[in-house]
Image (tube, helix red, strand yellow):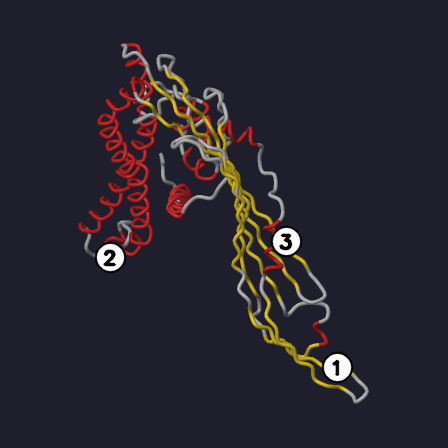
């Protein structure tokens, strides 16, 4: 550990390197045979074994995931001093409300259709009369129409009602905090933070004469950039107009156009293109003035190794009649290095991280399944 102590509150230099092990020992008992001048004799060996040999990867070097310069630029993109994050994005909400209206219209039509079927059933009480007149039976309605209604209700809530409620709450909160945003850009000293990271996974396998072992390895690098700035923007009508347009999202962007596309949110569940477009469409406000007080950065590398040893495998195991041991002996080890140092940055030269690929959450997967059902079932205007 290296640490330079300076005055309180300063961004001092430090470097830490730490490894922690969790590889408990397990008892292994082997029974075999040995040939000598007398003949065959039994050989028994009892010893303890852990997964440390499989976790030894933690002592190696960290793999290259991304350059420090690119990670720093991505972290800076989240902390431009002249960018106002929308408290309420009116342009985006307007685009989403069109989809919400279409979804609600489809829901109302499905409800009306089922209500009409039920009214016909109430009118024609006799199943025989219903069949003669071509009316569907009660069982036929429950098997199809009630499923349609359930999907329509849930999609209507997920795609229309809930977003409308959330947008209303967001607008109320944005209005409440508006004065604080104005005060911030005109007189406050603020600490800005940005973060960027990369992750990867790999595995290893090693057969040997005595036993087999392997490991799954998780690697992560995280870069954080910190800046302290003093705002001193003149409180002018030009500043207030620019701030209001940005804070309330009154100017459409390429991100707004993307969100307006039907079912674009499904793409974002797998590939966050919407977040990327929102990042590249940020508009710095020229009326905001500030002075940079200090800047610095930190880098954290983490390597987590989940190791295993199979004492029942190995090319010499044929000599042993029995092996009494856990099927797999497991353990883990973690290594972390942390570097922090002051460094000068241009806070206007950020780089939006590229969109990444992921898997939808369980609620999102449910919504996708319902939309797929609705499309295959002939729903209109989803």
Q: Is 311 situated above or below 256?
A: below
Q: Nearer the viewer, residue 79 or 149?
A: 79
**Which of label 2 and label 1 is nearer to you?**
1
In the picture, measured across the screen, residue 201 lies left or right of residue 107, that is right
Q: Residue at x 25, y 42 (%)?
A: 111
Q: Residues within 10 Å of mark 1 (few under 14, many from 20)?
A: few
In the picture, measured across the screen, residue 326 lies left or right of residue 230, that is right
**Which of label 1 and label 3 is nearer to you?**
1
Q: Is 201 situated above or below 198?
A: below
Q: Nearer the viewer, residue 377 or 6?
A: 6
Residue lying at the far right in this picture: please name it: 37
| Helix, strand or loop under label 1 | strand
Q: Residue at x 72, y 76 (%)?
A: 319
Q: Residue at x 65, y 77 (%)?
A: 45
Position in image of residue 48 (x %, y %) = 59, 70
Disc 1, disc 3: CB below 8 Å?
no
Q: Residue at x 51, y 40 (%)?
A: 338
| Helix, strand or loop under label 3 | strand
| Helix, strand or loop under label 2 | helix
Q: Residues within 10 Å of mark 2 (few under 14, many from 20)?
A: some
Q: Residues within 10 Å of mark 3 (few under 14, many from 20)?
A: few
Q: Which residue is mark 3?
A: 204
Is tag 2's residue or tag 1's residue first in the polypeptide sequence?
Answer: 1
In the picture, measured across the screen, residue 15 lies left or right of residue 247, that is right
Q: Which residue is mark 2?
A: 127
Is tag 1's residue or tag 3's residue first in the polypeptide sequence?
Answer: 1
Q: CA distance from mark 1 to mark 3?
A: 34 Å
Q: CA distance from mark 2 to mark 1?
A: 86 Å
Disc 3, disc 2: CB below 8 Å?
no
Q: Which residue is mark 1?
A: 34
Q: CA distance from mark 3 to mark 2?
A: 68 Å
**Which of label 3 and label 2 is nearer to you?**
3
């Amino acid at each position: 550990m290296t640490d330079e102590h300076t005055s309180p509150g300063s961004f001092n230099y430090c470097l830490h390197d730490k490894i922690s092990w969790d590889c408990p020992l397990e008892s292994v008992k082997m029974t075999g045979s040995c040939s000598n001048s007398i003949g065959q004799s039994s050989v028994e060996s009892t010893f303890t074994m852990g997964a440390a040999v499989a976790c030894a990867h933690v002592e190696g070097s960290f793999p290259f995931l991304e350059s420090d310069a690119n990670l720093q630029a991505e972290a800076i993109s989240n902390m431009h001093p002249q960018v106002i994050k929308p408290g309420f994005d009116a342009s985006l909400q307007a685009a989403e409300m069109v989809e919400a209206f279409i979804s609600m219209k489809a829901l109302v039509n499905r409800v009306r259709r089922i209500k009409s079927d039920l009214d016909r059933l109430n009118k024609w009480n006799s199943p025989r009369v219903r069949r003669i007149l071509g009316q569907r039976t009660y069982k036929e309605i429950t098997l199809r129409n009630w499923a349609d209604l359930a999907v329509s209700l849930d999609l209507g809530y997920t795609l229309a009602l809930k977003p409308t409620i959330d947008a209303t709450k967001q607008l109320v909160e944005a209005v409440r905090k508006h004065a604080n945003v104005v005060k911030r850009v005109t007189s406050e000293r603020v600490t800005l933070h940005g973060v960027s990271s990369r992750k990867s996974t790999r595995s290893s396998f090693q057969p040997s004469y005595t036993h087999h072992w392997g490991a799954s390895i998780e690697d992560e690098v995280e870069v954080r950039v910190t800046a302290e700035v003093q705002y001193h923007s003149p409180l002018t009508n030009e500043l207030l107009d620019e701030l209001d347009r940005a804070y309330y999202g009154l100017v459409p962007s390429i991100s707004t156009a993307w969100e307006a596309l039907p079912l674009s949110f499904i793409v974002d569940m797998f590939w966050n293109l919407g977040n990327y477009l929102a990042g590249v469409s940020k508009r710095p406000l020229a009326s905001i003035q500030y002075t940079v007080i200090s800047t610095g950065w930190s880098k954290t590398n983490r390597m987590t190794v989940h190791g295993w040893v199979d004492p029942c495998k190995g090319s010499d195991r044929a000599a042993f009649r029995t092996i009494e041991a856990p099927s797999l002996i497991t353990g883990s080890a973690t290594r972390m290095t942390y570097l922090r140092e002051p460094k000068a940055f241009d806070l206007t030269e950020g780089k939006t991280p590229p969109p990444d690929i992921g898997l939808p959450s369980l609620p999102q997967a449910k919504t996708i399944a319902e939309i797929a059902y609705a499309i295959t079932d002939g729903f209109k205007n989803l």
